[in-house]
Image: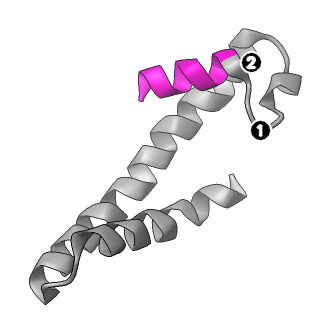
């Protein structure tokens, strides 16, 4: 996650380059990367567990877990 936060701070995607200097972007992207991981990871674990228990394909279940977990980050 550190590499993700650093990379996003360097390139400044999604209009974040206008935030300001590298340090400002770093202060934005590091918590966003770690927060995203902390929010999405439990949904992925639940989706994988449910897929195993219900004998469903893992791919679509994991995609659904990522999609549902990403919804809260759209408001950040």
**Element assignment for label 1:** loop
Q: Callout 2 environment at 10 Å: few (<14), some (14 to 19), or many (20+)?
A: some
Labels 1 and 2 touching (C-beta < 8 A): no
Residue pointed to by mark 1:
14
**Element assignment for label 2:** helix
* Highlighted range, magenta: 1-10
Q: CA distance from mark 1 to mark 2?
A: 15 Å
At 67% from the left edge and 30% from the top edge, which residue is drawn? 28
In the displayed structure, 25 sits above or below 59; it is above
In the displayed structure, 71 sits above or below 10; it is below
Q: Position of residue 59 (x, y in %)?
A: 30, 68
At 57% from the left edge and 20% from the top edge, which residue is drawn? 7
Residue pointed to by mark 2:
24
How are the residues colored? one colour
Q: Position of residue 11 (x, y in %)?
A: 69, 20
Q: Which numbered disc, 1 or 2, marks the residue closer to the eye?
A: 1
> Which of marks 2 and 1 precedes in the sequence?
1
């Amino acid at each position: 996650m550190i590499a993700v936060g650093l990379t996003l701070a360097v390139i400044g995607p999604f209009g974040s380059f206008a935030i300001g200097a590298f340090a400002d972007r770093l202060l934005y992207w590091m918590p966003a990367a770690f927060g995203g991981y902390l929010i999405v990871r439990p949904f992925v674990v639940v989706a994988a567990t449910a897929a195993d228990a219900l004998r469903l394909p893992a791919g679509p279940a994991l995609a659904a877990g990522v999609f549902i977990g990403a919804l809260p980050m759209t408001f950040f």
